[in-house]
Amino acid sequence: MFDTLLSLSEQFTGSVKLKIGYCLNGMHKGEACSYCVEVCPADAIVLTGDVFSPLKMYQARCVRCGACVSACPTGVFVQPRQVEEQENVTRVLEELQDFSIELTCPQHPGNHVSVAPVDALVGVGRCLGSLPLSRILAWAMSTEGDLWLNDSLCASCPIGQVSQRISTTAELANRFLEAWGKKERVRLVSGLRDGGGREHRPDFYDGQQPGYSRRDFFKALGRMMFRTVGTIVEEALSTPLPESDSEVPAERLRLRAVFSAMGEPKVEEIELKGLPFASLSVSNSCSGCNLCVRICPTGALTASVEELWYSLDFLEPDCIGCDLCAMVCPEKAIEVRSILNAAHLIQSEPVSLVTGHLVPCKECGVPVREREGEESLCHVCKVKRSSRSGEIYDLLDELGEVVGPEQ
């Protein structure tokens, strides 16, 4: 097994870099994000419990499969080579839009035999667990047939632990396709009954060598005369990502582009419990202190003030459901929900969660949001007035948990 791991680490090029300041575990001691640890097949990532240095990565153990890159919701892990490889696959799939496609990893045998009902095999050049949702969803939209992920070798692979990641991504892609009125089309070879159909030899395409077979040459010329919905989606992915002042992860920007290219969703709500997506609601107890805005790791929460009119705004496609905003809210005004408004996923402008006039706190003078039926006090002064000194220290302890980088 050691020799196989060594071989994989040599085959999967591009070392993984860390942007440690983006780790959720370093922003609040109550956070318990472990996506990277759960997906890593080589035990190369360890959570330390230290908010100042929340994780360690042992490069000597890393097989460079890239699963952590696609799993992390805030973009802590960066592997530029992986992005280039996925763009190569995109160019290959653009020429195979009429086909049912099977994606294979480098562990796939060289005989290029398939038991799935596919017209073509495409080698992606890396573990399928490295493929992010945005790519899978866009590739599924770009083909007329089904998109198959060959996970049949995961059970015998030394890094087969990532098979759960492959399954989760496929399930999530199908859930979004269904929400947009599309049929389920992302499938796993391991899910074929009785091991699948008869063995056959579809045309094989190296995903790292964009091009197409001679048989498809004239078909490709014909397809150049018109553009399919899938092509539009792929162009959205291949376009350079817009510059942003916030810390929106690149994967979220790609997802936003894919959702927009898919058109209007066909359902009102979508349930995404246990996944890095969420919607928020804010009660009238919000004082406008902006702690939630300061700690939001993706910039999904923003605040604006115009002529003392306060607005707390939210961009749902960028929310990763980390709960940090609810954790730090001193008024406990924020509720995080796993049921999303599907229409909000294609919005490029935030919606207001709560608004109101700003008035001075009667004790210290800091601006607070005016709340009907309540005295204009900031949370600190409200606790002080309660004459329960212990609560003051509790509040200070709570605020001291926010140790992340300045937003």
Image (cartoon, rainbow, N blue to C red):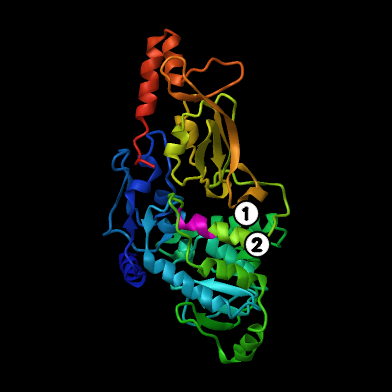
Is residue 281 in view from this perspective? no
Which numbered disc, 2 or 1, marks the residue that appears first in the sequence? Answer: 2
Quadrant position of the C terminus in the picture: top left
Q: Is residue 168 magenta?
A: no
Pointer 1 local density, CA inside 10 Å: few below 14, some 14–19, many at least 20 = many
Q: Nearer the viewer, residue 93 or 62?
A: 93
Q: Residue 218 sits in which quadrant?
A: bottom right
Residue lying at the far top in this picture: please name it.
Answer: 387
Identify the amino acid type marked 2.
Met
Q: Position of residue 219 (x, y in %)?
A: 65, 87
User: Which residue occupies 60% across, 67% down?
Assistant: 233
250 in magenta = yes
Q: Which residue is mark 2?
A: 262
Residues at marks 2 and 1, CA–CA distance in whole angstroms: 9 Å
In terms of secondary structure, where does tag 2 sit?
loop
The one nearer the camera, 97 or 160, is 97
Image quadrant occupied by the N terminus = bottom left
Q: Give the camera-side residue of 329 and 38.
A: 329
Quarter-of-image position of residue 189: bottom right
Q: Which residue sits at x=72%, y=50%?
A: 267
Q: Name which residue type carries label 1.
A: Ile
- Find out whether the residues at labels 2 and 1 contact each other: C-beta distance under 8 Å: yes
Q: Which residues are magenta?
A: 249-254
Residue 168 location, quadrant? bottom right
Residue picked out by circle 1: 346
Q: Main secondary structure of the magenta part?
A: helix
